[in-house]
Amino acid sequence: MTPERVAVRGALWRFCAVGASGVVVNLGALAALTGAGVVSSLASALAIELSILSNFALNDRWTFLAAREGRGDTWGGRLARFQLVSLVGALAQWVTFLLGVLAVARLGLVEGAWAAYAPTLARGPLAVVCAPPPVGAWQYGAQLAGVGVATTWNFLANFYWTWGRVAGR
């Protein structure tokens, strides 16, 4: 196996371990925020951002430590690149969350959720963002599905751009 493949594989495992801790932060924040009465779509977005910041700190200090040493770039530059990459991943995760809660309601996995939600949905797509259907614990499955969608993009973009050669170092 080539040294580059070994580096990619090692970084991927560390990235996934950091990502797992980010899932705990993400779902914990989602539970805390929705428990405090924050609408689930806003709670999801805030939980995603908290996990992004947590993941950056751990990836910068552990996953990509060797890649950043001796490069001369700044912590702020890496954070800005990570945030841009994560914004795309977060958007994919958030849209997946919203589609997931709609699917749960539409498929009847929560009895009566779709019928109760149909008048809200009739007000237009913004209603989905402002007042998604209440689906109880299914919201965590929707959030996890979004995490899965975002992971591949986030790893590759961060490996090759945030801390990698494409960043000009």
Image: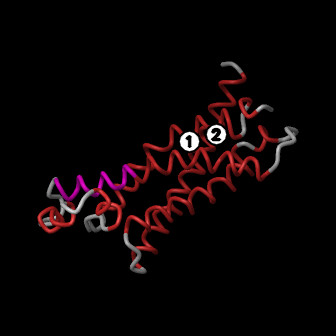
Residue 139 at x, y percent in the picture: 33, 62
For the N terminus, give its image quadrant: top right
Residue 169 vs residue 2, the one in the foreground = 169
Residue 15 falls left or right of residue 101: right
- Mark 2 and mark 1: span between their CA atoms? 6 Å
Q: Is residue 89 magenta?
A: no
Residue 3 falls left or right of residue 53: right
Residue 95 vs residue 121, the one in the foreground = 121
Residue 157 is drawn in which quadrant?
Answer: top right
Residue at far top of view: 1
Label 1: which residue? 154
In this rendering, the count of numbered labels is 2
Please name the amino acid that badge 1 sits on.
Asn
- Magenta range is 95-106
Label 2: which residue? 158
Residue 69 vs residue 134, the one in the foreground = 134
Please name the amino acid that badge 2 sits on.
Asn
Are there few (<14), some (14-19), or many (20+) residues within 10 Å of tag 1? Answer: many
Residue 136 at x, y percent in the picture: 28, 68
For the stretch drawn in magenta, the main secondary structure is: helix
